[in-house]
Image: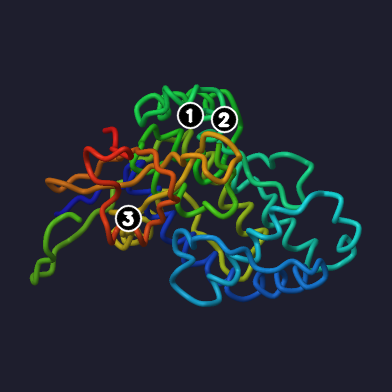
């Protein structure tokens, strides 16, 4: 009997894969149509910015990323021009969902979500930002809240690797301040559910809200009966090299950006943090490996 344990990390990486595949369907279809309509009504051109995360995978996702970024820059004073549009109301309901944290500043047309990692960054001087400190701080923040955002679930697990991976999955909506070869013989498999009950309880809220927003593509419930589903999904999660900007020094265009990236060495994952005047995307990090050691942008581990 082969026992496959679904612990917090396996569960969350599995949830992440299923979420990404489902949200991409909506972003490249229904939500892209909404973003086009709202942008046209506001005469907002697509943002000329680096394309982050999985939004490089398809032209429709790239277009959606650029349109939403442009709309996020607009102020709340533009709302009367589009308030009656069903497309605006739908896009607002999605981007303001608790899936991504608590909606941020109300002076924006589409406020970005502020998850526990954002709160930890906001409450810690940039000179003290590092992986271990922010992981602990984000865990303390989420423990005192009812946050059930995707990143919040990772913060509850206290796992920096998962935090970095899941933050990259929701970067458009978030504010910024392998186990052996397969055997050829049939083997009986038992999937063991070892997810913390409190984590599963909050994950249920995330799943319920996602399924309410997107009833045609439903996330599986975080229960023992779905252990096999989350295990198999987690095996498909290619998190090595994911890189996400989670903070910056100031609003100025020349300010340095603070990133977390996932490296894999000796069969395990670790999180590398670094500052850079450039915005490093997952695509670039996987291609170039991040800033060179000893450079002004030298990484801290």
Q: Earlier in the sequence, mark 1 or mark 2?
A: 2
Q: Closer to the camera, 83 or 48?
A: 48
Q: Is residue 278 left or right of residue 213?
A: left
Q: Label 1 belongs to which residue? A: 138
Q: Secondary structure at mark 1?
A: helix
Q: Earlier in the sequence, mark 2 or mark 3?
A: 2
Answer whether residue 210 is visible to the viewer in this image: yes
Q: Secondary structure at mark 2?
A: helix
Quadrant housing residue 29: bottom right
Marking on residue 119: 2
Q: Tell me how far mark 2 sits from mark 3, CA to CA.
A: 26 Å
Q: Tell me how far mark 1 sits from mark 2, CA to CA.
A: 7 Å
Q: Tell me how far mark 3 sits from mark 1, CA to CA.
A: 25 Å
Tell me what residue is drawn at x 44 percent, y 72 percent.
57
- Residue 301 in the image, given as x and y percentages of width and height: 26, 33
Image marks 1 and 2: residues in contact by CB distance under 8 Å: yes
Q: Label 3 belongs to which residue? A: 285
Vertical arrangement, residue 243 with respect to residue 297, above or below: below
Q: Is residue 75 left or right of residue 14?
A: right
Packing grade of label 3 (10 A; few <14, some 14-19, many >=20) is some
Q: Is residue 273 left or right of residue 246?
A: left
Q: Is residue 286 left or right of residue 195?
A: left
Q: Closer to the camera, 44 or 166?
A: 44
Observer-side mark, 2 or 3, equals 3
- Residue 78 in the image, given as x and y percentages of width and height: 85, 56
Answer whether residue 205 is visible to the viewer in this image: no
């Amino acid at each position: 009997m082969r026992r496959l344990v679904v612990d917090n990390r396996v569960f969350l990486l599995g949830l992440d894969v299923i979420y990404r595949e489902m949200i991409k369907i909506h972003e490249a279809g229904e939500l892209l149509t909404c973003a086009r309509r709202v942008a046209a009504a506001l005469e907002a051109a697509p943002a000329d910015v680096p394309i982050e995360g999985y939004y490089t995978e398809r032209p429709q996702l790239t277009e959606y990323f650029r349109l939403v970024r442009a709309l996020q820059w607009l102020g709340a004073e533009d709302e009367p021009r589009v308030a009656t549009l069903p497309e605006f109301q739908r896009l607002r309901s999605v981007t303001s969902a608790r899936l991504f944290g608590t909606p941020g500043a109300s002076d924006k047309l589409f406020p970005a979500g502020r998850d526990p990692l954002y709160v930890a960054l906001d409450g810690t001087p940039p000179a003290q930002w590092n992986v271990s400190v922010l992981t602990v701080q984000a865990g303390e923040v989420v423990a005192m809240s009812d946050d059930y955002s995707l990143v919040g679930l990772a913060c509850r697990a206290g796992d920096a690797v998962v935090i970095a991976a899941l933050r990259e999955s929701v970067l458009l909506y978030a504010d910024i301040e392998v186990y052996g070869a397969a055997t050829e013989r049939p083997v009986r498999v038992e999937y063991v559910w070892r997810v913390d009950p409190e984590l599963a309880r909050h994950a249920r809220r995330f799943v319920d809200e996602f399924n309410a927003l997107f009833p045609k593509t439903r996330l599986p419930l975080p229960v023992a009966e779905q252990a096999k589903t989350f295990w198999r999904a987690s095996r498909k999660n290619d998190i090595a090299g994911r890189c996400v900007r989670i903070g910056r020094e100031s609003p100025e265009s020349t300010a340095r950006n603070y990133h977390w990236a996932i490296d894999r060495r000796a069969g395990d994952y670790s999180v590398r943090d670094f500052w850079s005047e450039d915005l490093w995307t997952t695509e670039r990090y996987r291609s170039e490996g991040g800033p060179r050691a000893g450079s002004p942008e030298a990484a801290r581990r």
